[in-house]
Image: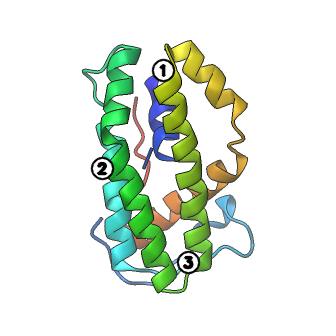
Amino acid sequence: MFKLVTMIAVVAAIAGCSSSDSAPSAESTTASASYTGSASVCADLQTIADADERTRDPAAQSWEQQRAVILDGRNSGLDAFDRAIGDAESVRDATLADDLEAVRAFTVDTIEAVRSSTNFDDFSAQIQALDSTAAAAAGERLNDYSIATCGFPLIADGP
């Protein structure tokens, strides 16, 4: 149940890596999507991945507990997105910056849904009303980039 919350909060809220040029897999990208490797971007993505991992707190069983975990970590995740966007722009990687901006915008909308929801069903209804198409595609490309360039997934598998 909370895997959706976690994925959306990072894709959806929020790494040690090499500086090599790698492109995400063709399966989840458009023909024009390619990225430039950057250690600073990888470090920012690690912060985002860590924020995602923290939202998977196994002790947070109720909606209120999960909601608190997400809201408590929102600023560090959004700050990491802001740094990653700036770092992508500094290496003149507009595609990476655009994907980060799309996921960050959806993350902000998701956090607002978490904040204003009184229960999980209310949250689910609000999330279903959002258009996640661009953020989902951008999130897949970012995850592929993170795996290929930084050596870790942006969004971990798990409950």
Q: Secondary structure at mark 3?
A: loop
The span from disc 1 to disc 2 (Cα, nearest Å) is 20 Å
Read off the residue under disc 3: 35
Q: Position of residue 67 (x, y in %)?
A: 39, 25
User: Mark 2: which amino acid?
Assistant: Asp
User: Is residue 23 in view?
Assistant: yes
At a point 37% along the width and 51% down the height, the residue shown is 77
From what the image shows, is residue 73 above or below residue 103? above
Q: Residues within 10 Å of mark 3 (few under 14, many from 20)?
A: many
User: Mark 3: which amino acid?
Assistant: Tyr
Read off the residue under disc 1: 1
The span from disc 3 to disc 1 (Cα, nearest Å) is 33 Å
118 relative position to 52: left or right: right
Q: Earlier in the sequence, mark 2 or mark 3?
A: 3
Read off the residue under disc 2: 50
Q: How many marks?
A: 3
Q: Residues within 10 Å of mark 1 (few under 14, many from 20)?
A: few
Q: Residue furthest right?
A: 31
From what the image shows, is residue 117 above or below residue 7? above
At a point 43% along the width and 60% down the height, the residue shown is 81
* Image quadrant assignment for residue 18: bottom left
The span from disc 2 to disc 3 (Cα, nearest Å) is 22 Å
Tag 1–tag 2 contact (CB < 8 Å): no
User: Mark 1: which amino acid?
Assistant: Met
Q: Earlier in the sequence, mark 3 or mark 1?
A: 1
11 relative position to 133: left or right: left
At a point 56% along the width and 81% down the height, the residue shown is 93
Q: Position of residue 70 (x, y in %)?
A: 37, 34
